[in-house]
Image (tube, rainbow, N blue to C red):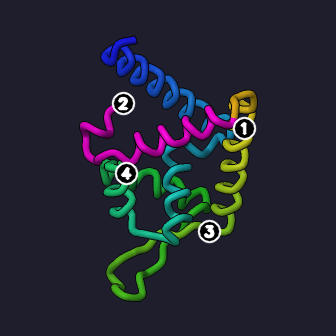
Amino acid sequence: MEAAQAVETIQREMTTFARRARASAGRLHPELSLVSYTLLGHLEESGGCRATDLAAHYALDKSTVSRQVAALERAGLIERSQDPRDHRVQVLHLTDAGRRVLAQVTESRRAAFRERLARWPREDLERFAEYLVRYNAWGTGPASDAG
């Protein structure tokens, strides 16, 4: 396979992967979109942050993040608190319910990956993991985020 054909195949397969990820997110937790799941995961990893930080980190429009945050607040999965260093700033944190839902969905996603990859040889899994890390570590911005 020539390089151009390989790149086309990669693009097509990654698009298919993204579509499946969005579709499966709804099956794992009907009220939790893939974007919401991703935002909850970031809040857990970061220990809380501002909505503008989420928008910047994921290169999302502030209004998109605002709608997601409002829905997550209504669902009782996140809450706001004042930043102790700057009382003008609101910091988003997971609630206990948010942590439980995130843990449930994360475990369901891991189980789905384990099942799908169960017959792959260890060497292939390691190589695939390395390739994904390298791909996702490359650059930032619209050109590198395409797909």
- Which residue is disc 1 drawn over? 114
Q: CA distance from mark 3 to mark 2?
A: 33 Å
Of 145 and 31, the residue lying toward us? 145
Label 4 to label 2: alpha-carbon separation: 14 Å
Residues at marks 4 and 1 touching, judged by CB atoms closer than 8 Å: no
Q: Could you tell me if the residues under marks 4 and 2 are in contact, i.e. CB atoms within 8 Å?
A: no
Circle 3: residue type: Thr
Which residue is the site of mark 4?
58
Mark linked to residue 147:
2
Q: CA distance from mark 2 to mark 1?
A: 25 Å
Residue at image x 72%, y 38%? 114
Confirm whether the magenta stretch covers residue 101: no
Q: Quadrant of the C terminus?
A: top left
Image-based side of 135 in relation to 18, left or right: left
Q: Are marks 4 and 3 in contact (CB under 8 Å)?
A: no
Rounded to the nearest angstrom, the CA distance separating label 4 from label 1 is 26 Å
Question: At 60% from the left edge and 61% from the top edge, which residue is drawn?
Answer: 77
Label 3, secondary structure: give it.
loop
On whether residue 129 falls in the magenta region, the answer is yes
Under circle 2, the secondary element is: loop
Q: Secondary structure at mark 4?
A: helix
Q: Earlier in the sequence, mark 4 or mark 1?
A: 4
